[in-house]
Image (spheres, rainbow, N blue to C red):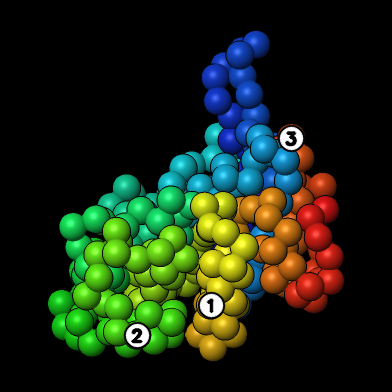
Amino acid sequence: MPICELRNVTRSYGTGEARVDALREVSLAIEPGEFTVFCGPSGSGKTTLLNQIGCLDAPTEGELLIEGRPTARMSSRELSRLRADKIGFVFQSFNLIPVLTALENIELSLELAGRNQGVREAAQAMLPQVGLEGLGHRRPNQLSGGQQQRVAVARALVKRPLLVIADEPTANLDSVNGEQVLDTMRRLNASLHTTFLFSSHDPRVVAHARRVITLRDGRIVSDEVRQPGSAGVA
């Protein structure tokens, strides 16, 4: 069973002549363990699609199912719990809390998911997995951009989510740090079998992806499975 399925999803803003369709009749299934990138030009609908899958927004038309359950039938509390328990987020701007250490930022993800026991141990166990062993005591301003993004990856993964959503995760990183972050996520995808979904027009992200879905004007125009390193952005 797909972990996520969209059925004829349209997301519109405005009404009448002012209506803009950010997504148009998108149908898509995401299977467990995918490492998939949504690419396309600015305004193509990449981030809107991620927001739908991450249950941060609701379709204007159509249906979204998570593990076979229609999200339209979930209460706001159920949706909040779904995001807290089963979806990890990695943002372009890291979104770490500046007054917390790297370790405390990772712990926060578990606390928001309602975990009360083993929080410190689970967070500490993530540090070596993202190449940050010995750096848990540092605050974000004491870390490089690449290190901050790896803290964000650890924060997303520590709760062992169903899927991780990464919106332009390398956009604020130089080539070396971007490659390190992508290597980290690809390795964790393989070892933990966690599904990763990206939005990006960075060729480095596309080169790492197993599946590349291209959007244009809110529609999927291509959907192909490829081996890492086989091609650039469509």
Residue 88 appears anywhere in the view? no
Residue marked by disc 1: 184
Residue in the foreground of this view, choosing between 14 and 155: 155
Q: Is residue 55 positioned above or below 159 on the image? A: above
Residue 123 left/right relative to 164: left
Foreground disc of the pair 2, 1: 2
The residue that label 3 is drawn on is 217
Q: Give the residue type that dot 2 points to.
A: Glu
- Between the residue at mark 2 and the residue at mark 1, the CA separation in whole angstroms equals 14 Å
* Residue 203 or residue 53, whichever sits in front: 203
Tag 1's secondary structure? Answer: helix
Q: Is residue 201 left or right of residue 151?
A: right
User: Closer to the N terminus: mark 2 or mark 3?
Assistant: 2
Marked residue nearer the N-terminal end (2 or 1): 2
Q: Is residue 48 above or below residue 70?
A: above
Q: Is residue 225 visible?
A: yes
Residue count near mark 3 (Cα–Cα under 10 Å), binned few <14, some 14–19, many ≥20: some
Query: Which residue position holds label 2?
Result: 133
Q: Among all residues in the image, which is located at the extreme top?
A: 17
- In front of the other: 108 or 152: 152
The quadrant in which residue 107 appears is: bottom left
At label 1, which amino acid type do we have?
Thr
**Residue 194, x across and y down, in percent:** 52, 77
* Mark 2 vs mark 3, CA separation in Å: 43 Å
Between the residue at mark 1 and the residue at mark 3, the CA separation in whole angstroms equals 32 Å
Q: Nearer the viewer, residue 22 or 66?
A: 22
Question: Residue 42: horizontal and vertical position, in percent?
Answer: 67, 38
Quadrant assignment, res 158: bottom left
Residue at 48% from the left image edge and 42% from the top image edge: 58
Residue type (three-letter) at the residue carrying disc 3: Asp
Q: Residues within 10 Å of mark 1 (few under 14, many from 20)?
A: some
